[in-house]
Every structure is written in C-alpha cells, then in structure tokens.
Amino acid sequence: MRELVVLSGKGGTGKTSVLGSLAVLAGRAVLADCDVDAADLHLLLHPVVLRSEPFFAGHEAMIRAEACTGCGACAPLCRAGAILAHNGSYAVEPLLCEGCGLCVRICPAAAIDFPSRRCGELYVSETRVGPMVHARLDPGGESSGKLVTLVRREARKLAVERGETWVLVDGPPGIGCPVIASLSEATGVLVVTEPTPSGRHDLERVLELCRHFGVPPSVCVNKWDLHPELTADIEELARAQGAQVVGRIPYDLTVTTAQVQGRPVVELKGPAADEITALWARLQAIGGASAIRA
Amino acid sequence: MIVAIASGKGGTGKTTVALSLALAADRPVRLLDCDVEEPNCHLFLAGEQTFREDVTLPTPAVDLDACTACGTCGETCQFGGIIVLPTGAHVFPGLCHACGACVRLCPAGALREEPRRIGELTEIQAGTITLITGRLDVGQTLAPPVVRAVRARGDGEELQIVDAPPGTSCPVVAAVRGADVVVLVTEPTPFGLNDLELAVETVRRLGLPFGVIVNRAGAGDARVHEYCAKEGIPILMEIPQDRRIAEAYARGLPVVSACPELRPAFLALLDRLAEMARHAVMVRTCGRRVFYAVDEGVNL
C-alpha cells in the first residue's frame, strides 16, 4: 500500500484540484480528505455517504448553574480563560474550553460536569473511483488533528480490506497539528506550490517538516508561468532540500471551469490536464524508488 | 479598531487584502500576522526589526526524587502528555497543552513548570505600518498560543489589521476572537462558497459583525453572490479576476500596489468597517430598539 499525501503549506495552491485529478488517473484508489475544517474534495468526486458517525474527542467542562455556589475558585485557574462570571455564578464558554479538567477536579461543590465533546462527523463514502473517507469538523472546533488521524486510519483499513494499492490523501494547509497528523508515517508527500513569495516561503517550511518526520517529498509548481524565474528558483530550492521535482502546471482557467462543473480538471482538455497526467506518470515511475517508499 | 481578515479556504487573498488595507490606511497601523503556521506579510514589507521574543509554554518537569509515582498526574492529563512508570512520572512535552492541571494537583509537589519554546514573535517597522509576525516552530503542533501572543501585542487605540489563518478551527478562533469586525475573503467558485459557508458559521458563533470580499470576481459562477444575497451578508468589495494581478503578486506586489486606482476603495472600506463595528456595539449595548433606529437612519 502506498499512501501519498498532497500538501502545500500555503492554502489555495491547487491541492484539491490536483488530488481529484490523480484519483481519476489512478482509476482505483482509497481517498481521504484530511482538510477537515474546510473539506472540498467532495465537490469534485460527489461521494455517496454509506456511513456517518459523530466524532467525539476529549471532554468539555460544564458548570451546573444550580449547584454552583459562586465561590470563584475555578475561574482564575483556567488558563484558557474559558470560565466567565455570570449572574453571581460561573459558566464555561465552550469555544474556549480546552478540556483539561482542572476546574472539574478542584471545584469544592463538585458542580462541574465533564461530558465527552462532539467535535464533528466522520463519513465513509463511495465514489466512482473508489471509497472515500472524509469528515467535517464543527465550526470553531478543537481536535482537528485527532479527526485527521481517524480519517487516515479508516482509509488505510479500507485499502487493506479491498486490496487497493493507493491511498490518496488531500492534506490541510499549514504545518501545524492537522498537517502533522496527515503526514506522519505516510509513504510519500507531493507538495503543490506556486511561484509567489508566499508559495516559496511556505514550501521551505513544509519541506523542513517532511525532513523532520522522514517522509520523502516531491514538488510540483502550479501556475508556473506566472513567474518563470521564480519557478526555476523554487525547483532548485526543492532539489537542494532533497525533493524530487515532478512537474509544472501552467496557469489555466479550465481549472476554475472544471471546479464550477464539479469535475476534476483532468477530465477537461487543456494544458493543466496534460501536465497533471504527465505528473501522475512520473509519480508512479518513481513509485518504488526514493520519492515514494512502498 | 481591530479588523480581522479571514476565510475558510486558503489562498483566496487574505494576505493581499490585509496588506492593501494597511498600505491604504491614512493613519498608523498595527498589522498582526496571525497565520503563524505560514506567515507571509513580512515578504511584502521591508523594514527594520524593532522587537523579537520567544513564544514559550510552561511545561512540566518532574523532580524524580520527590515523585512518589502515585499516578495522579497521568490520570489528570487529558492530552496524553504524562505517563507514570514505577520509577516516576514521564512528560511528553510535544503533547502538553500547558493547562497546569498536573502541577496544581500533584500531591507531592514533584512537578514544576519550565518554559518551552514553540515559536517566536518579531516586530518590524515599515513606514507607518508596524508588522507583528508570529511564527510556529516547524514540528510544533500548538498554533493557538502563538496566535494569542501576536494578538496580545496589539494596542487598543490603534487601527489593527489581523491576517488570520485559513480554516475554521481553533487557530482561527484565536485570531478573530475579540475583533470589532471581520472580513471574509472568498472567490466565486464552489470551493470558495463551501468554505465561506463554514467560515460564516464560525464567525456567527463568535457573534462578530462581518462582510465579504469577492476576489477573482468573474472567474467562476454566481453562487457566492446568491448565497450572500440570501443570507443578507454585505459584499464589501470585488477584486476582478485578472492575470496581471496574479503576476504582480508573484513579483511581491499586493493588489493595492499593482492597481493603485484601488487605493481609494480600500480607504473607503476602512470607513465602512468602522461603521459596521460601531453599529454592532450599539446593537450589543442598547438592544434591538436602537438597531432599528440606526437602520432607519434616525439621528440619536
């Protein structure tokens, strides 16, 4: 089984458009959308949900107003600043509570409950190219990293059950908690970047993260012709950091057209589709070698 | 006034809008780069560094001579940050959320806190713009404390512009919380719309006034406009789809520098945002009666 994670650092460089196309080119694959707080892959692959389940992670403190004596012991201890005075007693602001449970343990009146916290929903679905695992984090929610881990675990399980070769993972932007959860123990990473100062800067940090976790990266530059010199500079930087450069995708408005039609761009004719097709061939060719550890 | 620039989807133009507002302003601005996983504002501004400090979290350290291996800290920690072996407690700093519960509850007093670096904060002065950048160290997971450190460098009086991270989860909440008004930047595509709806839910949960900027207007379809009309969300500005704007950005120019004719529009936007913020405060403090009075243009 090969698990390829598409990352970018900077958002909006084209991760989902590329990954949706790779899924079609692969023909069969297990798909995982790990951008759980702004998932978009479903808009290209139109999954039919077979199973959904609520996602619980950790706990949240809830003060029972009738039991609270208003002593105020809890509020100054809460480092999240989540306990607010309210009509002579206290209440927890759920968006701020991190679920550490300190208030629950120190309340002299035992007035604080600590129920499990619902943070989102997990979906296991079927698409025309294979099963897809995706999720929705409740807006403003915590524990996105844990939800990402759950999505990946389900996707790997399905790949084993069905004997699929590829698990294709649409990763979140950034380099923090949900990205680390997407990346650890993957067999390969494809970083989609763009020739802008932000794209270059963010790529460097993602490559550093790949090194940190020992996952071999490949790089492709999207919209490369917006700044050909910067594209060349980025490719040189990527190679110097030990990444394989696997393609250049041109600035092509059919990418937007495809998105509006709800289809992966590779299903439309155009220069972007041609390049992504070539990119997939290269990713497969280096499959057993350094860039994708089988 | 604190203006937060956010979006569900990444790459819609938050940073170019934040920079353009800061560059167009007719007064000193504090620009707070709260996209601490991938901060970018500094790539577009040149200036002298005036301040730098580490962002640290208080993380427990065990005094094994005092530790009785009673197990209290391990049971207390909700984040899997401590295991207790027969030889004593063992801390995994990477999992620690710095809540302080273990230290507070250790019956033997065997835990103390030591600062652990997770990122850094820098400040540069670029003309009338003071840029404060938060940067999460590579390999660290906890972005919200770095975001809060950046927000804490803001000053109540001045105009503050917050460049928020993409998404809708806890780092976004940390970045936009307490803002006077929020601008959601989107693009007129299905991805833009899907993620805008999620961002709207988040901002509504926080109870903040907000409006939308449509970037790359004309590129996709009409569904973002239809959604905003249905929800009564004001569209504050439209930035046209234009390859030249994308090329200028690739060469380090935010949209207001690439298209100087937009400067008055950004300046006017600041006034409009101040009006939205004032209106929201009146609604909060005086209730619905004033809300209607303001809508009807009654002079109070």
Image (cartoon, coloured by chain):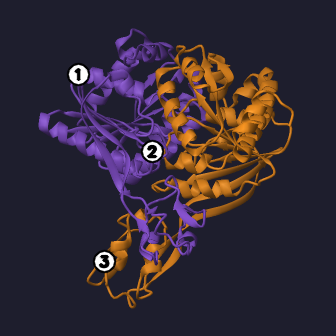
Of circles 1 and 3, the one toward us is 3
Q: Is residue B106 visible?
A: yes
Mark 2 surroundings within 10 Å by alpha-carbon count, few (fewer than 14), some (14 through 19), many (20 or more): many
Chain A pictured colour:
purple
Pointer 1 with pointer 3, Cβ within 8 A: no
Pointer 2 with pointer 3, Cβ within 8 A: no
Q: Is residue A125 left or right of residue A101?
A: left
Q: CA distance from mark 2 to mark 3?
A: 35 Å
Of circles 2 and 3, the one toward us is 3
Percent position (x, y) of residue B26?
86, 37
In the rendered image, which residue does mark 1 sit on?
Answer: A27
In the rendered image, which residue does mark 3 sit on?
Answer: B84
Of circles 2 and 1, the one toward us is 1
Colour orange belongs to chain? B
Q: Is residue A210 visible?
A: no
Mark 3 surroundings within 10 Å by alpha-carbon count, few (fewer than 14), some (14 through 19), many (20 or more): some
The residue type indicated by label 2 comes to Leu
Image quarter in which the N terminus of chain A is found: top left
In this view, the residue in front, A116 or A203, is A116
Q: CA distance from mark 1 to mark 3?
A: 49 Å
In the rendered image, which residue does mark 2 sit on?
Answer: A207
The residue type indicated by label 1 comes to Gly
